[in-house]
Amino acid sequence: MPPIKTLFTHKTIFLFGIFLIMVGMPLSKFLMSVGQFVLLGNWIWEGDWKRKWQVLKRSRVLWVISGFYLLHLIGLLWTTDFDYAFNDLRIKLPLLWFPLLFITSKPLEKKEIQVLLWFFVAAIFIASMVCTMVWLGYTNHRVVDIRDISIFNSHIRFALMIDLAICFLLYNFFKSGKLYLYAVKIALVIWLVTFLAIMQSFTGIIILCIVMAYYAFLFLKNLQKPPLRISAFTIVGLFVTSLIVIVVKEIKEQQMPVKPVTRLYRTVNGMDYYNDLLNTETENGNLTWANVCEPELEKEWNKRSQLKYRGTDKKGNPIRLTILRYLASKGLNKDSMAISKQTAADIALIENGTPNFLYTNKSGMENRVYELIYEYESYKKGNNPTGHSFQMRLEFWRVGLDIVKRRWLYGVGTGDVQRVYDNQYHLSGSKLRSEWRKRSHNQFLAITIAFGVTGLSVFLLYLFYPAIAIRTKHYLFSGFFIICILSMINEDTLETQAGVTFFGLFYNLFLFAAQKDTERFSALPGKTNEPLNPAPLVAFNKDNLKNYS
C-alpha cells in the first residue's frame, strides 16, 4: 500500500477535483460545485507562483480566453440591473478560472484523462438508469412530460452529456483487444442512443447525428479497401434515409389536404355552433375550429375530468385547446356528444396534453417531429405560442432580434438582458403569458443582446482562437466542439451553472490538460519566434491508436 503522502499529492487532489465534477455533472450539482472548490483550493495551496506567473505571461491563448470574461466586467459600465449582472458574473466564473487552472497546472497523463472520462461515462449510465426507473414509475417523482424524467438536471444538458459520452465510447472503441470490452462499449452506445429516444430529446439526437456524420466522413475518407468503404457508405446512407423518411412522412401528415366539412348551426341540444372556416389549423386534415360549441364542451368536460375546462393540461397548455385538437383529430364535432363518446383512456390522454389520438400509434420521436412541424405552422399563423417549446423559442428569437436592431453595436450591458426583454415583449404585443417571457435560448443571440456585434466578435474569438492557435486536430475535441456550438443555437448554454461547467471543463481539458508546458504558449503562426508544437492531443487514426490508452 502506498504511503499517505504519495496519495495526497497536489496531482491526485487535482484529479480528484476533476473526478467530482465529472461525476457531479450528470448526477449531483452539489458534487459538481464541491469539485470546483477542490480544484481552486488545491491550486492556491500548491503555490509555485513564480512558475505559474511565467506561464501566464507567455500564454497568449489565456489572455484571449480571459477577454471574454473581461467583456462582462466592462459591460457593467452601461448596465442598470447589478443584481442580475453580478449573478451572471458568478455563474461564468468557471470560464475564467478553468483555463487558468489547466494552463498553469502540470500536464496530465493521457491514461489519467481516459480514466476520468470512463468515470464520466459511468456516471452518465447510472443517471440514465435512474431516469429510466422514474419513467417506469418506480419512484414517486411526477412525470407530466417525458422530459421530466431527467431529474438531475435539464434534459437538454443531459442529452449533450450523453452525446459526448457516446463520442468517447466510439473514439475509444478500437483501443482494446479484449472481446468483453468491445461488448461493453457496444452495449453502452446502444443503450445511450435508446435512452435519448426514450427521453425524446430531439436536440440531442439531431446533434448526435451531425457529429456521427462528421466522424463517418473522416472514417470513410481513410478507408483503403473499396468493399469496406462501400459497405460503410451503405450503412450511413440507410441511416440518413430512414431519418429523412420519418421527417417527410410527418410533414405530409401535417400538410394533408383539408377534408370537406359540413357547416352546422346548432347542436342536438339546440346550442349554437361557432365556425371559423378561415382558420386553417387542422389535425389529420380536419379543421380544428369547425363546429365548435364551447359551452357544451365545458359542461360535459367538467363532468368527466378533475382538470377544469378553463384550466391547463398536465403539460401546462390550455386544456380547452388540447380538447379541440384531440376531437378534431378524430373528425368529430366539438360538443357534448363528442366528449361523452370518449373513453376513460381518451380523457387521460387529453389531461396529459396529448393533442392527437394518432400519437398513441407512433414512436416518441415521430410524435416529436409531428409536433415541431405543427408548432412551426401554428406560429406562422400568429397563434399564441404559450406552452409550446418550439413556438416559444421562435418568439424568444423574434423579440431578441428586435432588441438587437435597436442596440446592435454595444448591446444593453451585462445585467439588463431580462429587463430589456420584458420591455420588448410589451412593446411588440407578444401573446406569450408573462411567466413564459424568457430570454433568447440562443447563446449567440444572448451575447449580441448583451454586448452587441462587438461582444459577439469577442465571443467568436474566445470560441475558435485557442483551437486554431494550438492547432489541435484531436477528434474527440472536435466532436465535443461541434456538440457545444450546435447546442448554442438552440440553448443559451453558458447562462447556467451546469452549461458553463460542462463547456468550461471539457473545453480546457481537451485543449490544455495533456499538453507539455511549451505547447501552452502557442500563438498563430508568424506572431512569435517560439516554436509551435503540433496538436497536443493528436488525430485519431490507425497510426496513433495508443493515444489515450
Image (spheres, rainbow, N blue to C red):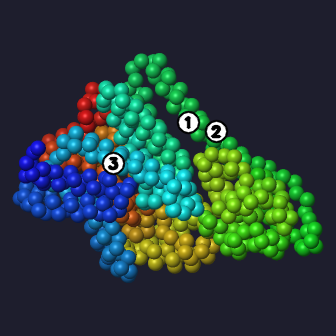
User: Nearer the observer, disc 3 or disc 2?
Assistant: 3
Q: Amino acid at mark 2?
A: Val
Q: Amino acid at mark 1?
A: Val
When asked about the image quadrant of residue 502, the answer is bottom left
Q: Which residue is mark 1?
A: 240
| Other residues around mark 3 within 10 Å, as few (<14) / some (14–19) / many (≥20) | many
| Other residues around mark 2 within 10 Å, as few (<14) / some (14–19) / many (≥20) | few
Q: Residue 327: x, y in percent?
A: 78, 60
Q: Secondary structure at mark 1?
A: helix
Mark 3 or mark 1: whose residue is earlier in sequence: 3
| Other residues around mark 1 within 10 Å, as few (<14) / some (14–19) / many (≥20) | few
Judge by depth and name the residue closer to the eye, 356 or 465: 356
Instruction: State the separation of the CA atoms marked 3 and 1.
Output: 29 Å
Instruction: Quarter of the image for the C terminus: give it.
Output: top left
Task: Tell me which residue sits at (65%, 61%) in the image.
Answer: 352
When asked about the image quadrant of residue 430, the answer is bottom right
Task: Tell me which residue sits at (10%, 45%) in the image.
Answer: 2
User: Nearer the observer, disc 3 or disc 1?
Assistant: 3
Mark 3 or mark 2: whose residue is earlier in sequence: 3
Up/down of 181 relative to 204, above or below? above
Q: Which residue is mark 2?
A: 245
In the picture, the disc for residue 120 is 3
Task: Tell me which residue sits at (25%, 53%) in the image.
Answer: 18
Residue 277 visible from this viewpoint: no
Report whether 56 appears left or right of 149.
left
